[in-house]
Amino acid sequence: MRIDIVAAGRLKKGPEAAMVDDYLARFARTGRGIGLPPVGLAEIEGRRGGGMTAEAELIARAIPAGAALVMLDERGQQVTSPEFAARLAGFRDAARDVCFVIGGADGLDPALRARADWQIAFGSMVWPHLLVRVMLAEQLYRAATILAGSPYHRD
């Protein structure tokens, strides 16, 4: 199993990058004992003036072949952290690679979104794509702690 994040834009040094690095390092430590590999991160630099379609082409090239696609989109399903953890465990148990996709400021191209196996939203509000990356990294860590039986998540 592989877990990848394909995200539009590059995180520069700063608090968002530090938080993503911290949560993904925590995920790697916690996930190791429960059969979850470290998360790979591919940052896609959009072409100037190419718009959403050009960005979608770059994102599509970065998605590992055969991976289950989880798109982060404000129109996606809103799930609880335990539901997210259960879905992640399902991918692990099926030995299926999973790729989380975060679009840029204009969102995800409809043709790319149509390829999703699962679309999720972190609430009905629209979030900056850099914050979505932090939120996803935290939720991956939270999912690992839920699956490991750690007290980090409190119901």
Image (cartoon, rainbow, N blue to C red):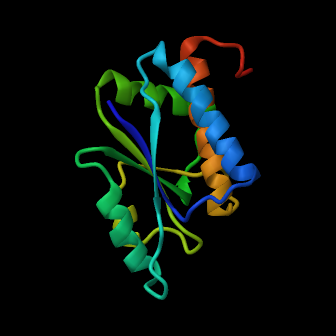
Residue 143, position in %: x, y? 57, 27
Q: In this view, does 153 lie to the left or right of 26?
A: right
Residue 114, position in %: x, y? 35, 63
Residue 30, position in %: x, y? 56, 19
Residue 114 appears anywhere in the view: no
Q: Quadrant of the N terminus?
A: top left
Q: Tell me the residue at 56%/21% (across/down).
A: 29
Residue 109 appears anywhere in the view: yes
Frontmost residue, 149 versus 34:
34
Frontmost residue, 55 versus 43:
43
Q: Which residue lies furthest to the left in this view?
A: 66
Q: Which residue lies furthest to the front in this view?
A: 13
Image: 37 above or below 50: above
Image: 33 above or below 141: above
**Hey, which quadrant is residue 47 in on the image?**
bottom left
**Hey, which quadrant is residue 82 in on the image?**
top right
Q: In which quarter of the image is the C terminus?
A: top right
Q: Tell me the residue at 56%/13% (across/down).
A: 148
Q: In this view, does 57 lie to the left or right of 23?
A: left
Q: Tell me the residue at 29%/25% (across/down).
A: 94
Residue 109, position in %: x, y? 42, 72
Q: Tell me the residue at 70%/44% (across/down).
A: 18
| Picture mark count | 0
